[in-house]
Image (spheres, rainbow, N blue to C red):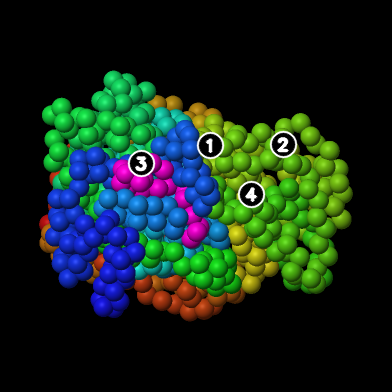
C-alpha cells in the first residue's frame, strides 16, 4: 500500500510540476504526521496560513467557466492563491474534483481542501431525524445509520459532516431538538459516541470527519427561541451540557463547531473558557474548531466586537480555528499579526490543527481520494442503504397508547379509512435538514399501507396542513381556514371499522429557525381529529413531527397513538409494518411530552424544590393551578404489543467503598403474546450532596429482546463515573452517603432499592 501511495505522490509531482515539487519534503509518507506538518508550515507564508483558516460556501458552477466578477471570482482567485482551507456545499464527484484540482495543481504549495456538508440524518437516502433515532435507544443501529450516511456522502466527494448535533435540550419550543438526542446527558453521550464512530469509521475513503455541535449550551436558548442568549449555572453546564461533547472527544472526533448563542454574556464563538480552557485544555482535543455560519461576524451584532478586525482577533484568540462564511479571517488576521495585535503562534496552532485533520484523512497522499464516480453511481440510493434506513425507522417508532389492543391492525377483512394530508405526503416525512435529498422521495404512509392488499383501504385528505410549498428557507404557512375536506373524511370514517389518522408537523416546521410557541397539532388538524372521532372513535393516531407535541385531548380520547416522527425515505413502509404487527414497536421517548406549552421546559431530571408536594393540604407548594406539573408522557416512556414484568431487583450488598463496583440486577419477563424488545432503564438519585442533585438521573440502560414467556436477568454495573458529579468549578466529586436506585420501564415507573457509599 505504501508503494502505491508513494507512486501516486510521484505522479502528482510530475503532473503538477513546481507546486508539488516545492512540497515534496512533507509528501514523504515515512515521516510522522506532526513532522510533515512542521515541514509544510515552514514553507507557508502568513497569508497562506491564514488561508487554511478560511472556509467558503461553494455557490458557482465549478465545472463550468471560471467566475469573472463578484464574490465568486474572489473565492476562485483565493483558492488559486492558497487562501482557502475548506469548501462548504460543493458536492458531487465532478464538482469536488474540479475545485480540488485548483487547490492542488494551481497553487504554490498544493494543499488540498476539505469538503464539508450538513449530512444530518443521511445524504440522499434518509434515516429518521436524529431525535427519532434517539427513541430507538439502539446504539448499534444509530452507529450504522451514521455509517450509511457516511457511505453516501463520501461517495459524492464529501469528507466532512457538520454532525452530530449533541445539544441537550429540554424545551420543545426550540426547533432544533429534532437534530439532537433529547433531554438526557447520559443517553445523549452514548448516542453522540455512536454517531461519531459511525461517521468516521477507519478514516478510509468511505468515512467522513464528524463535527460535534454546537459548543456550547445552544439547546438552552431562552424561551426556546432560535439564536437567542443563554444564561446558566456552571453546575448545569458541567453536568448536563458538556458530557455529550466530552463523549465525542473520547470517541475520537476530529472537529467541533461553536454555537450562535452567547453564554453568560460572551458569544460562544469568542469564548476562550469553552474553547481554550475546556476543549483544548482540560480535554486535550487535538482537532480543530469551525465557527457556525458567519458566527464570527455576528459577534459585532451581539455587541461583543467593534468591527470585523475585532471579531477576527477575539475569535482567533479564543480558539475558533476556521471561519465559516464571515470572511473576516482572510481579510483581517494577517494584518492583525503584522501589527502585533494577534500572535502568530495563535495562527500556527489553528493551522496545525487543520492540517492535522487533512493529513489524517489522507488528502495529502491522495487529494482525489473521495473522487470515485463509479462508487458514487453504485452506492447512493442502493437497496442496501434503503434496507438500513428502513430498519432504523422501525426501531424509532414509539407506541404511546393502545387501549383495547386496537393495534396491531387486522391484515385481512377490515375496512380501514386513512385520513390526513400527511398520510399521502412523500416530502414532509423526509424531515428537516435533508438538503441533498430529492423532493418527494419518501415512501408515504398511504403507499406503505397499500402493500397490505387484503383489507379495503379508503383514503381521504381531510385537510391540508400547509398552504405553501415546503422550503428550507421559508416559513410554513399553516392552513387554518379551509375545512372543505372534512365531510368526505367523516363519511369515510363512518363507514370504516378502524380509522388511521396521520397528523402532525410539516417536515420544515422543525429544525433551525423553526421555534414555536404553540405545540398543538398545527392548523385545523385538531378540529379534524375531533370531528372524525364523533363518527368513529376507533382511531389510530399516527404522529409525524420533529419535536414533542402537546396532545392532551388525544391522550384522553384516542385509543391508539403512534409516535412516528419524521422517519426519512422509508417512512411509509416502517409505519405500515408497525401498524400491521410485522414489527413490534420498541421505542422509548428521548424527550418528555408536555401537557401544554406553558410547562416548557419540562424534563424528568429536575431538582426538588423546598416544597415539592402539598403535604400541608394548601396552595403553598410547587405546582400549577391549572394543570398537573408532570409531563403528559415522560422521558423513557414507550409501549409494546406485548407486556413485560420486572421482578427481583437486587443490589449485590447494602454498602460499598468508594471506587468499588456496584452490581445491580433485575429479572424481566415477557408476559404477553408477542416476542418483543424492551429498554431496561436504571436511574440513580443522590438525596444529599454539597450541590443539590436531580430527583433521578439515567445511569444505565440495556435494550433486550425477549420471546413470549422468556425471562432474562439484566446486570448493571455502577462506578464512580455514574455516581459522581461536577461541582461549580468543574471538579468531579464522588461523595459518600445513601443512594436510591430505580430500575424500570420509563423515568417515572420502576422497582426501587438503595445502597450506601462509604
- Determine if residue 640 is in view: no
Report the magenta residues as a range.
76-95
Residue 549: x %, y % from top left:
56, 43
> Badge 1 is on which residue?
514
Label 2: element kind: loop
- The reply to whether dot 3 and dot 4 touch (C-beta < 8 Å) is no
Q: Alpha-carbon distance for marks 2 and 3?
A: 43 Å
- Looking at the image, residue 2 sits to the left or right of residue 549; the answer is left
Which residue is labeled 2 in the image? 467
| x, y percent for residue 322 | 30, 42
Marks 3 and 1, the one that precedes in the sequence: 3
- Mark 3 or 1: in front is 3
Q: Is residue 634 magenta?
A: no
Whole-angstrom CA distance, mark 4 to mark 2, is 13 Å
Quarter of the image where the N terminus is located: bottom left
**x then y, percent, for residue 386:** 57, 68
Amino acid at each position: 500500500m505504501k508503494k502505491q501511495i508513494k507512486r501516486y505522490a510521484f505522479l502528482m509531482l510530475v503532473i503538477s510540476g513546481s507546486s508539488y515539487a516545492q512540497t515534496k519534503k512533507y509528501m514523504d509518507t515515512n515521516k510522522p504526521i506532526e513532522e510533515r506538518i512542521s515541514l509544510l508550515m515552514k514553507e507557508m507564508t502568513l497569508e497562506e496560513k491564514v488561508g487554511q483558516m478560511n472556509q467558503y460556501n461553494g455557490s458557482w458552477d465549478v465545472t463550468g467557466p471560471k467566475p469573472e466578477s463578484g464574490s465568486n471570482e474572489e473565492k476562485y482567485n483565493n483558492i488559486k492563491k492558497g487562501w482557502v482551507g475548506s469548501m462548504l456545499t460543493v458536492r458531487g464527484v465532478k464538482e469536488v474534483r474540479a475545485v480540488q484540482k485548483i487547490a492542488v495543481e494551481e497553487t504554490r504549495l498544493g494543499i488540498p481542501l476539505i469538503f464539508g456538508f450538513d449530512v444530518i440524518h443521511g445524504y440522499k437516502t434518509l434515516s429518521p431525524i436524529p431525535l427519532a433515532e434517539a427513541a430507538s435507544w439502539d446504539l448499534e443501529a444509530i452507529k450504522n445509520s451514521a455509517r450509511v450516511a457516511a457511505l453516501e456522502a463520501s461517495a459524492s466527494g464529501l469528507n466532512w459532516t457538520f454532525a452530530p448535533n449533541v445539544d441537550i435540550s429540554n424545551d420543545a419550543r426550540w426547533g432544533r431538538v429534532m437534530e439532537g438526542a433529547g433531554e438526557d446527558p447520559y443517553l445523549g453521550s452514548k448516542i453522540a459516541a455512536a454517531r461519531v464512530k459511525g461517521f468516521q469509521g477507519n478514516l478510509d475513503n468511505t468515512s467522513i470527519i464528524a463535527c460535534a455541535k454546537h459548543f456550547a449550551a445552544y439547546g438552552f436558548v431562552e424561551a426556546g427561541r432560535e439564536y437567542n442568549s443563554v444564561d446558566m449555572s456552571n453546575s448545569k453546564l458541567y453536568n448536563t451540557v458538556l458530557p455529550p461533547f466530552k463523549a465525542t472527544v473520547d470517541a475520537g472526533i476530529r472537529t467541533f463547531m461553536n454555537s450562535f448563542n452567547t453564554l453568560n454574556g460572551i458569544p460562544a464563538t469568542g469564548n476562550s473558557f469553552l474553547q481554550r480552557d475546556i476543549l483544548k485544555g482540560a480535554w486535550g482535543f487535538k482537532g480543530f474548531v469551525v465557527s457556525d455560519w458567519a458566527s464570527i461576524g455576528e459577534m459585532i451584532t451581539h455587541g461583543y466586537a467593534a468591527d470585523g478586525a475585532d471579531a477576527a482577533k477575539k475569535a482567533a484568540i479564543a480558539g475558533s480555528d476556521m471561519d465559516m462564511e464571515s470572511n473576516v479571517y482572510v481579510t483581517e488576521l494577517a494584518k492583525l499579526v503584522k501589527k502585533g495585535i494577534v500572535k502568530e503562534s495563535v495562527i500556527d496552532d489553528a493551522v496545525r490543527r487543520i492540517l492535522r485533520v487533512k493529513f489524517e484523512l489522507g488528502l495529502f497522499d491522495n487529494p482525489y481520494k473521495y473522487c470515485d464516480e463509479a462508487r458514487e453511481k453504485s452506492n447512493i440510493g442502493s437497496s442496501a442503504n434503503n434496507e438500513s434506513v428502513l430498519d432504523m425507522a422501525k426501531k424509532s417508532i414509539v407506541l404511546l397508547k393502545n387501549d383495547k389492543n386496537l393495534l396491531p391492525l387486522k391484515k385481512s377483512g377490515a375496512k380501514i379509512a386513512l385520513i390526513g394530508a400527511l398520510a399521502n405526503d412523500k416530502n414532509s416525512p423526509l424531515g428537516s435538514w435533508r438538503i441533498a435529498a430529492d423532493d418527494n422521495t419518501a415512501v408515504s404512509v398511504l403507499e406503505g399501507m397499500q402493500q397490505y392488499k387484503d383489507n379495503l383501504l379508503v383514503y381521504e385528505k381531510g385537510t391540508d396542513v400547509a398552504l405553501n410549498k415546503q422550503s428550507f428557507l421559508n416559513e410554513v404557512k399553516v392552513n387554518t381556514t379551509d375545512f372543505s375536506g372534512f365531510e368526505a373524511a367523516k363519511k369515510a370514517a363512518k363507514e370504516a371499522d378502524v380509522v388511521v389518522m396521520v397528523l402532525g408537523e410539516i417536515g420544515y416546521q422543525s429544525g433551525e429557525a423553526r421555534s414555536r410557541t404553540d405545540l398543538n397539532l398545527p392548523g385545523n388538524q385538531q378540529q379534524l381529529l375531533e370531528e372524525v372521532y364523533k363518527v368513529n372513535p376507533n382511531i389510530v393516531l399516527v404522529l409525524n413531527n420533529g419535536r414533542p407535541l402537546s396532545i392532551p385531548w388525544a391522550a384522553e380520547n384516542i385509543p391508539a397513538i403512534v409516535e412516528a416522527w419524521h422517519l426519512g425515505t422509508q417512512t411509509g413502509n416502517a409505519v405500515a409494518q408497525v401498524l400491521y404487527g410485522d414489527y413490534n414497536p420498541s421505542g422509548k421517548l428521548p424527550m418528555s411530552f408536555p401537557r401544554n406549552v406553558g410547562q416548557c421546559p419540562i424534563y424528568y431530571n429536575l431538582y426538588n424544590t423546598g416544597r415539592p408536594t402539598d403535604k400541608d393540604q394548601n396552595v403553598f407548594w410547587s405546582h400549577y393551578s391549572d394543570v398537573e406539573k408532570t409531563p403528559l408522557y415522560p422521558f423513557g416512556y414507550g409501549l409494546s404489543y406485548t407486556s413485560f414484568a420486572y421482578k427481583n431487583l437486587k443490589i449485590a450488598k447494602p454498602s460499598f467503598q468508594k471506587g468499588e463496583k456496584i452490581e445491580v440486577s433485575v429479572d424481566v419477563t415477557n408476559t404477553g403474546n408477542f416476542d418483543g424488545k424492551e429498554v431496561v432503564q436504571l436511574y440513580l438519585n443522590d438525596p444529599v450532596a454539597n450541590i443539590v442533585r436531580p430527583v433521578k438521573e439515567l445511569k444505565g440502560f440495556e435494550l433486550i429482546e425477549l420471546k413470549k414467556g422468556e425471562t432474562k436477568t439484566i446486570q448493571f454495573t455502577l462506578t464512580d463515573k455514574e455516581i459522581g458529579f461536577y461541582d461549580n468549578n468543574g471538579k468531579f466529586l464522588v461523595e459518600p452517603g445513601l443512594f436510591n436506585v430505580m430500575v424500570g420501564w420509563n423515568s417515572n415507573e420502576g422497582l426501587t432499592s438503595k445502597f450506601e457509599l462509604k
